[in-house]
């Protein structure tokens, strides 16, 4: 143990700096799933796509892998301006040793805070501020991520459920019509879902449903 500490203390400062950068990179990668889900548009997209599949009642079609993959690429597309700003203002200067690690963190958090603040309800943000007994901040940069992230997540979930409700309405109407027709014909033992499924798929294809869903998601940001 002593030999290890002596070796580390006598090592080149450049190697130590490289080790710190690698440690930072591994830390970011370990937190990447949480960052991706709670600080980007991923949550809203995957929830809405899941609502579409549930409304169609197509069980596992499209498969989970397809929905998650589509949500990932849509997330990268929507978040590309934010990620580019983080790379230019924080990561590149940090790797060039122009700024410190703390300053890089502050610079990287600003674009995410600006993005999240645009899609966060004031009511959700005030909930966490009241719980923490925090006074009203002067700027968005003064809001800590520990408050902004859960407030943003709550707002995204509500928005996704609102969009999912609107998606459900036309398919619910089809189910009700089919169920009424079957009852009037005395075919109560026949599951209405079995009959309504082809009509729902036909309607979704005729109106180019996937295009409309993706267009609505993109316009919501």
Image (cartoon, rainbow, N blue to C red):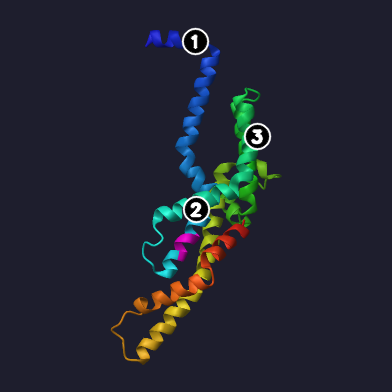
The residues tagged by marks 2 and 3 sit, at their Cα atoms, a distance apart of 25 Å
Mark 2 secondary-structure assignment: helix
Q: Is residue 132 at all visible to an observer of this figure?
A: no
Mark 3 secondary-structure assignment: helix
Whether tag 2 and tag 3 are in contact, CB under 8 A, the answer is: no
Q: Earlier in the sequence, mark 3 or mark 1?
A: 1
The residues tagged by marks 3 and 1 sit, at their Cα atoms, a distance apart of 30 Å
Q: Earlier in the sequence, mark 2 or mark 3?
A: 2
Estimate the x, y position of residue 130 in percent, counting from the top left: 59, 51
- The magenta-colored residue range is 48-52
The residue under the point 45% across, 52% down is: 68
Q: Which residue is mark 1?
A: 11
Q: Which residue is mark 2?
A: 71
The residue under the point 51% across, 29% down is: 24
Estimate the x, y position of residue 116 in percent, counting from the top left: 61, 49
Q: Is residue 190 above or below residue 130?
A: below
State yes or no: residue 149 in magenta: no
Name the quarter where the N terminus is drawn: top left
Mark 1 secondary-structure assignment: loop
The residue under the point 48% across, 10% down is: 9
For the residues carrying marks 2 and 1, which lies nearer the camera in this image? 2
Whether tag 2 and tag 1 are in contact, CB under 8 A, the answer is: no
């Amino acid at each position: 143990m002593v030999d290890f500490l002596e070796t580390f203390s006598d090592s080149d400062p450049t190697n130590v700096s490289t080790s710190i950068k690698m440690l930072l990179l591994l830390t970011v990668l370990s937190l990447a799933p949480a960052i991706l889900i709670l600080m980007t548009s991923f949550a809203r997209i995957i929830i809405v796509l899941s609502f579409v599949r549930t409304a169609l009642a197509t069980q596992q079609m499209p498969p989970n892998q397809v929905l998650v993959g589509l949500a990932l690429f849509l997330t990268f597309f929507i978040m590309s301006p934010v990620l580019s700003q983080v790379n230019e203002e924080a990561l590149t200067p940090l790797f060039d040793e122009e700024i410190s690690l703390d300053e890089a963190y502050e610079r990287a958090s600003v674009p995410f805070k600006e993005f999240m603040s645009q899609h966060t309800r004031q009511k959700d943000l005030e909930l966490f501020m009241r719980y923490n007994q925090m006074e009203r901040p002067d700027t968005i940069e003064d809001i800590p991520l520990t408050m902004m992230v859960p407030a943003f997540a709550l707002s995204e979930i509500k928005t996704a459920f609102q969009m999912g409700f609107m998606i459900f309405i036309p398919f619910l109407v089809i189910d009700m019509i089919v169920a009424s027709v079957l009852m009037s014909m005395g075919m109560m033992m026949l599951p209405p879902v079995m009959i309504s499924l082809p009509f729902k798929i036909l309607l979704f294809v005729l109106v180019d449903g996937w295009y409309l869903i993706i267009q609505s998601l993109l316009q919501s940001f």
